[in-house]
Amino acid sequence: MTYTAAHVRMPESSVLNIKNCSFAITAALTIPDTGAHGVVACQGGSMAGWSLYLDGEGVPTYHYNWYGHEHTIVRGTDPLRPGDHEVQLVFAYDGGFGAGGEANLLVDGVVVASGRIERTVPLVFSMSGETFDVGVDTGSPVGDYPHQFECTATIGGVTIERLDQPSTEVLEQVRRGMFRAGLTTQ
């Protein structure tokens, strides 16, 4: 599924679910001569979520926030140079319910950083209105960057894809967890 800068404030349920599976997030970016910074795409917020962004120096960064308790940052070493680039985060899931995996950050097909995410959010990132955004973070920041943090690169599109599917057992755990969560909110 490909999203553009027109996709902001999208509820979690309206975006491709990449929990409990391997996935890739691929962004087509054009960096101006002056460099770029800001959120490329994000989902969730300070309580839980993920963000793919260019830090204040223009370095590609992926931040995974597990319930505000564990923050994993996978950051390249160099700012993106002016011109067209593909920035991609590929997550290889261990399998299971809310398990971890390996995150690889690539620029133009070359791995620039890797990191281990020990556990992941299995059900929902937010029950308080945090959303999915492209080009800006309209909710509470997922990571340590300014509120909003608008992207100054031109975003040609952000493609999110599942690389595998959750197992039948995991899907049953998700169903039971969502049912229990629904009961507790009544």
Image (cartoon, grey):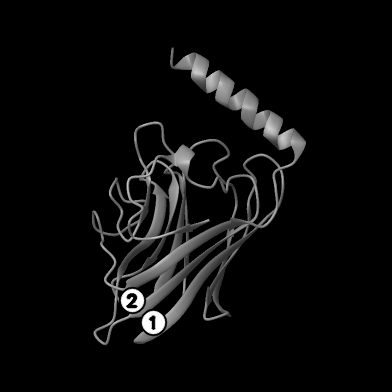
| Quadrant for the C terminus in the image | top left
Point out the tag, 2 or 1, that comes first from the N-terminus: 2
- Residue type, mark 1 in image: Leu
Left or right: residue 99 versus residue 150 is: right
User: Residue 85 lies in what quarter of the image?
Assistant: bottom left
- Residue type, mark 2 in image: Gly
Q: Indicate the secondary structure of the residue bearing disc 2.
A: loop
Q: Is residue 26 above or below residue 185?
A: below
Expressed as whole percent of the image width and height from the top left, the position of residue 80 reads: 39, 82
Q: Residues within 10 Å of mark 1 (few under 14, many from 20)?
A: many
- The number of numbered discs placed on residues in the rendered structure image is 2
Q: Which residue is mark 1?
A: 80
Left or right: residue 157 versus residue 169 is: left
- Most distant residue in the right direction: 168
- Most distant residue in the top direction: 186
Expressed as whole percent of the image width and height from the top left, the position of residue 94 reads: 70, 52
Expressed as whole percent of the image width and height from the top left, the position of residue 159 reads: 51, 62
Q: Residues within 10 Å of mark 2 (few under 14, many from 20)?
A: many
**Residue at 26% of width from left, 60% of height from top?**
149
In depth, the one of 144 and 174 nearer the eye is 174
Left or right: residue 159 versus residue 97 is: left
Can you tell which mark lies on residue 58? 2
Q: Is residue 77 visible?
A: no
Q: Are marks 2 and 1 in contact (CB under 8 Å)?
A: yes
Q: Is residue 72 above or below residue 58?
A: above
**Residue at 55% of width from left, 35% of height from top?**
123
Disc 2 versus disc 1: distance between alpha carbons? 6 Å
**Residue at 51% of width from left, 22% of height from top?**
181
User: Residue 110 lies in what quarter of the image?
Assistant: bottom right
